[in-house]
Image (tube, rainbow, N blue to C red):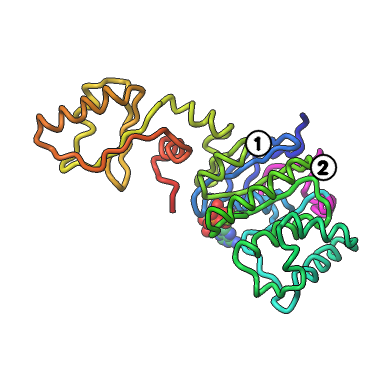
Amino acid sequence: MSVIVDVQELTKRYGGFLAVNKVSFAIEQGEIFGFLGPNGAGKTTCLEMMEGLRKPDGGKVLLKDISVWPEPAKVKNLIGVQLQSTSFYEELTVKEILVLFASLYGRKLSGRELDNLLSMAGLEEKRNAYTNSLSGGQKQRLAIITALVNEPEIIFLDEPTTGLDPQARRRSWEIIRELQGKGKTIILTTHYMEEAENLCERVAIIDQGKIVAIDQPQELIDQLGQKAKISFASSRPLASLFLAELGAEAGQVNSGEGQIVFTVDPAQTIGALLEKAKQEGIVIKNLHVSSPSLDDVFLSLTGKELRD
Ligand SMILES: Nc1ncnc2c1ncn2[C@@H]1O[C@H](COP(=O)(O)OP(=O)(O)OP(=O)(O)O)[C@@H](O)[C@H]1O
Ligand SMILES: [Mg+2]
């Protein structure tokens, strides 16, 4: 495996506001790499600096050892880009859009290339349809394949599945995996935990312009060192009372919905929780036990919930 994307201390300011703060990471060829973070975290800004669309205030981006800055044109043929909000000319058909995008790279798509792209996106039947007649999911898939017309090695997808229903999202994941199967390197952003957990080999969790963690999703979850999450609502705050009794084995974070306790021994913790509640005359409702997820990693790193 070789490093194909190398980002060093990448920084962007908008006026006095630091949107991306000395971000560094490397991506191996053939990886699906995800940026996960809440609105305004700096994901798009970071991607756009890597794509040569937004000039950094500091740091470096090397794609296949070629520096993107100061001459982004040098990487134009190496990369494919799907922007966060893509709107197509409504008077053009799906086929015409693909031909147009290819022409921007000085390329002419053969009939076979066109067929391959359409079939990858499941849009064979829609080749002569106007883009304004496509469903949301079809438009997003068209946006993904427009990023492929120049046969790029590195593909940037900014929120490729936002707003899609779970089935349409899975269809897009299949396309992304198919691209990976062809040796492409994919860098995407997402708000969706399931997407990061299921699709990405590694994720960088980004918050307020900084990478707060970077690893394989399961590694990040394992690093929490917690086997189960217990959440509940109680008529009076309770967790801190009984956590003291359980000692170091449980950790607690307050969330909007109620109380959350992480524990390595859920049976013991629930027993202690219910007993304590009974003693104190506190009513416990909505008791849930679940395995930790990337959501919990985010919560434990930033003290915030990632969900919008
Ligand atoms: N052109 C701009 N001028 C000034 N501030 C900007 C500009 N573009 C982005 N910002 C600010 O920089 C921060 C990062 O924005 P960015 O678009 O990179 O976030 P994001 O992580 O992609 O968010 P989202 O999930 O909403 O797409 C935000 O606070 C945003 O308001
Ligand atoms: Mg964005």
Whole-Å distance between the Cαs marked 2 and 1? 16 Å
Q: Which mark is residue 66?
A: 2
Q: Quadrant of residue 139?
A: bottom right
Would you say residue 64 sits in the magenta stretch?
yes
On screen, residue 117 above or below 250: below
Horizontal side of residue 274 vs 21, given as left or right: left
Residue depicted at x 84% and y 63%:
102
Closer to the camera in the image, 145 or 260: 145
Q: Which residue is mark 1?
A: 25
Quadrant position of the C terminus in the picture: bottom left
Q: Quadrant of residue 199?
A: top right
**Mark sitting earlier along the chain (2/1):** 1
Residue depicted at x 77% and y 43%:
184
Horizontal side of residue 44 vs 130, given as left or right: left
Q: Position of residue 125 (x, y in %)?
A: 73, 66
Quadrant position of the N terminus in the picture: top right
User: Label 1 neighbourhood size at 10 Å, few (<14), some (14-19), many (20+)?
Assistant: some
- Report the span colored magenta: 57-77
Quick one: SS at disc 1?
Answer: strand
In this rendering, does residue 271 appear at all? yes
Residue depicted at x 83% and y 55%:
150
